[in-house]
Amino acid sequence: MGIADILLTWYQGCKRDLPWRKDKDPYKVWVSEVMLQQTRVEAVKSYFERWVGRFPTLESLAVAEEEEVVRYWQGLGYYSRARNLLQGVREVSESYGGQVPDTRAEVIGLSGVGDYTAGAILSIAYDKKEVAIDGNVLRVFSRLYCIEEDIASLMGKRKIKSLVEREMPEENPGDFNQALMDLGATICIPKTPRCNFCPLGSFCLARARGLEGELPIKKKKSPPKPVRIIAGVIRNGENYLLHQRPNKGLLSGMWEFPSVEIKNEEVMDTFRQTLLEETGQEIQSERLLLQCNHTFSHRQWDISFYYCVITLGNEIPLGRRLKWVHRRDWEKLSFAGPHRKMEAYLLENPDFDSLI
């Protein structure tokens, strides 16, 4: 038996029970694969089930408002994924009659769909012989064939893609791709692979050469840049001043308590002066409500939330994407990253006013 036969036999007996594997609906395959990008499988399960409970079909998502879509994505991070998914299903609704296309050229032309997602949709939903190479597959094949190039490099990826294409069977290509993913997630894991349980152990060149713990080779990323931020919880009666982030960039389009990135030693003076310029409100910071860290791929926020009292209120300057929002309406908004923690901290406290 070859690699594909052994792997498929193993998969039939050991495949993970995942909610998106209940059927081969291309829309659900698409949603699951987008959710799984840079997010652990265990974390995705509940989000996927909640998502399909609200958006069970492609058309139900296509007609949804972006604000609601992003709200249902909250907790998964990388919100551009949700916006691209929404745009992609709208393109399918408008151009393909609501049916996800079954050719690589058409699928990869949809918003947010790259090589990996296209391969997953085509192989799993349509049984097309298309590879879907994620980090698990790169790791498995780097060990299986003792690839000593950086797996994040173009050369390393090309070499592994060629090998995966060579081993992929004509039948059940979707199961083959999913079997590789499961093997990498449960047995051929990073750092300390469970080689004694691997169905492909007799084929593995890295194990034969004692290199399974050293492979794959991957260049280390630079650590995220630390950034100090002060945010103001500014109250006017029952309303709170909120800011909507720009439509492009980090946490695009999401809501936050007005915040200032601090780059000098005059922390609170800079905070008050910048808030005055940006919001038109003169404020006095009363007390620290919450301090937390939030790490992105390239930045690490150290953010402090202060309750602020308005000493002189003015009209909000035009074009600043600011508005007063009653706290009962916060559930309709998508709060950005750590600002969601501040929202929850305020709303979940049984004696809300005692905080301030």
Image (spheres, rainbow, N blue to C red):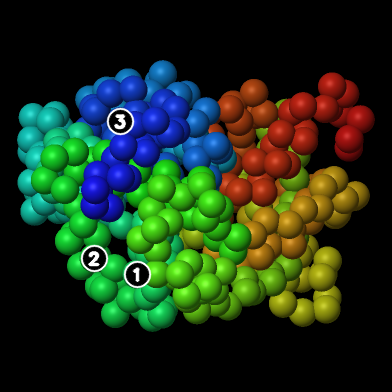
User: Which one is earlier in the sequence, the residue at label 3 or at label 2?
Assistant: 3
User: Which one is earlier in the sequence, the residue at label 1 or at label 2?
Assistant: 1
Tell me the quarter of the image containing the C terminus: top right
Check residue 293 in the rendering and tell me which mark sits there, or answer none: none
Instruction: Identify the element where label 2 is drawn.
Output: helix
Q: Which residue is mark 3?
A: 28
Cα–Cα span, label 3 and label 2: 28 Å
Label 2 Cα crowd, 10 Å radius (few <14 / some 14-19 / many 20+): some
Are the residues at dot 1 and dot 2 in contact (C-beta closer than 8 Å)?
yes
Label 1 Cα crowd, 10 Å radius (few <14 / some 14-19 / many 20+): some
Cα–Cα span, label 1 and label 2: 9 Å
Q: Which residue is mark 2?
A: 163
Cα–Cα span, label 1 and label 3: 33 Å
| Amino acid type at image mark 2 | Leu
- Can residue 30 be seen from the camera position used here? no
Label 3 Cα crowd, 10 Å radius (few <14 / some 14-19 / many 20+): many
- Indicate left or right for 41 with 240 as reference: left
Residue 92 appears at what percent x and percent y? 15, 37
Residue 43 appears at what percent x and percent y? 55, 38
Foreground tag (1 vs 3): 1
Viewer-proximal residue among 330 and 102? 102
Foreground tag (3 vs 2): 2
Residue drawn at 23 percent across, 27 percent down: 25
Residue 83 appears at what percent x and percent y? 36, 45
Residue drawn at 24 percent across, 44 percent down: 5
Check residue 145 in the rendering and tell me which mark sits there, or answer none: 1
| Amino acid type at image mark 1 | Tyr
Instruction: Identify the element where label 1 is drawn.
Output: loop
| Amino acid type at image mark 3 | Lys
Instruction: Identify the element where label 3 is drawn.
Output: helix
State the image quarter where residue 140 is shown: bottom left
User: Which one is earlier in the sequence, the residue at label 1 or at label 3?
Assistant: 3
